[in-house]
């Protein structure tokens, strides 16, 4: 199996799980989120709405930040 990357430990992931909140929209620019985006792109996963590609992971994190407003109380 090819190495795809790693995801660092971050307590905010645990907090999001305990609060039953999606982590990626809550922390879209964190190292964990960017690692997940990069691994997804390595796996060949594409954005269904064709907004992002591998070169635009930063744009994807900004888009997730905007969408996270929908999850806020």
Image: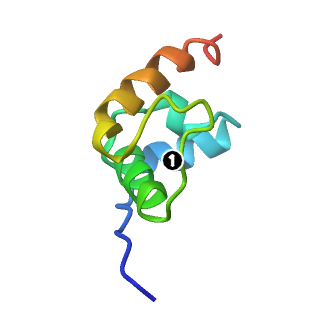
Residue 17: % across, % down? 64, 45
Give the crowd class for mark 1: few <14, some 14-19, many >=20 residues within 10 Å: some
Vertical comparison of 57 with 39: above or below: above
Q: Quarter of the image holding residue 63?
A: top left
Vertical comparison of 10 with 43: above or below: above
Q: Secondary structure at mark 1?
A: helix
Image quarter of the C terminus = top right
Q: Residue at x 41, y 45 (%)?
A: 33
Vertical comparison of 36 with 52: above or below: below
Q: Residue at x 39, y 84 (%)?
A: 2
Of the pair 39 and 45, the residue shown nearer to us? 45
Q: Residue at x 43, y 34 (%)?
A: 52
Residue 16: % across, % down? 58, 39
Q: Residue furthest right?
A: 20
Residue 62: % across, % down? 37, 23
Color theme of the render: rainbow
Instruction: Name the residue beneath numbered marker 1.
Output: 13
């Amino acid at each position: 199996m090819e190495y795809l990357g790693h995801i660092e430990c971050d307590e905010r992931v645990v907090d999001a799980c305990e609060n039953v909140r999606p982590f990626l929209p809550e922390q879209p620019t964190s190292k964990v989120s960017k690692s997940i985006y990069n691994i997804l792109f390595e796996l060949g996963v594409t954005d269904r709405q064709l907004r992002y590609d591998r070169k635009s992971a930063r744009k994807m994190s900004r888009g997730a930040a905007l969408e996270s407003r929908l999850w806020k109380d």
